[in-house]
Image (cartoon, rainbow, N blue to C red):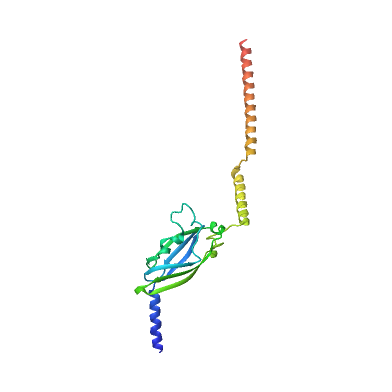
């Protein structure tokens, strides 16, 4: 009996180690959200199909210039993926934050992935895709008023440092107006002094001629 159990367990392990294994999940960087479909198994997966609850929906589905139409209408979701080799990954642009949050679209989807392995053996995986897990982690961040205030204060502090660095000054309109008035007054003083020198020099020459 124990030997029979060992044989069955060894067969199960060999099967698990050589089967395909298809995963679908969200990936995020900056404000971009991707859908990533990957076969992490050891053999090829065939006739891959997905069922989403609720149906996939993005902020780009109704955009007039979106030549590809709604994401849920893509061929790989409507007709399935004929085959996916081991280690192969398909990436699809899904949506953007914070527009998705503003539109109050679903952040969580339940997915059933079904596919066939060697000899047509069927497999099915139940997964949950959760975008909420990315919010506030640095991959996707939604900023509030406190965050915006802190960022503006940081910028203001940086500008102040720039104005004090090596005598560099960022001029306001008032500064420019006062500077121009000062330069104009200085120019008038220099012109008057030059004219006085000319007059004095000219008078001396005339006296000398007489």
Q: Position of residue 13 (x, y in %)?
A: 40, 78
* Outermost residue toward the top in this view: 210
For the residue pair 95 and 38, the one nearer the viewer reads as 95
For the residue pair 204 and 58, the one nearer the viewer reads as 58
Q: Position of residue 33 (x, y in %)?
A: 49, 60
For the C terminus, the quadrant is top right
Q: Position of residue 170 (x, y in %)?
A: 60, 42
For the N terminus, the quadrant is bottom left
Q: Is residue 90 left or right of residue 210?
A: left
Q: Is residue 155 above or below residue 187?
A: below
Q: Position of residue 131 (x, y in %)?
A: 52, 64
Q: Is residue 121 above or below residue 188?
A: below
For the residue pair 27 and 67, the one nearer the viewer reads as 67
* Outermost residue toward the bottom in this view: 1
For the residue pair 25 and 110, the one nearer the viewer reads as 110
Q: Is residue 27 above or below residue 159?
A: below
- Which residue is found at the position 63% from the left and 15% from the top? 203
- Which residue is found at the position 62% from the left and 37% from the top? 176
Quadrant in the picture for residue 3: bottom left
Q: Is residue 52 left or right of residue 8?
A: right
């Amino acid at each position: 009996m124990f030997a029979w159990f060992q044989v069955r367990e060894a067969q199960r392990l060999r099967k698990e180690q050589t089967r395909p294994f298809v995963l679908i999940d969200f990936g995020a960087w900056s404000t971009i959200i991707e859908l990533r479909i990957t076969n992490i198994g050891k053999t090829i997966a065939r006739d891959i199909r997905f069922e989403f609850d609720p149906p996939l929906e993005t902020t780009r589905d109704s955009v007039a210039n979106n030549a590809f139409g709604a994401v849920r209408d893509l061929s790989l979701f409507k007709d399935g993926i004929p085959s996916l080799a081991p280690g192969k990954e398909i990436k699809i642009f899904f949506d953007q934050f914070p527009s998705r949050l503003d539109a109050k679209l679903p952040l969580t989807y339940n997915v059933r992935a079904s596919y066939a392995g060697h000899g047509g053996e069927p497999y099915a995986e139940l997964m949950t895709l959760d975008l909420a897990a990315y919010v506030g982690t640095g991959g996707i961040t939604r900023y509030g008023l406190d965050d915006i205030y802190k960022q503006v204060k940081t910028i203001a502090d940086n500008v102040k440092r720039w104005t004090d660095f090596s005598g560099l000054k960022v001029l306001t309109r008032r500064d420019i107006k006062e500077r121009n008035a000062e330069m104009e007054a200085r120019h008038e003083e220099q012109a008057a002094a030059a004219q006085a020198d000319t007059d004095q020099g000219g008078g001396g020459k005339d006296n000398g001629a007489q």
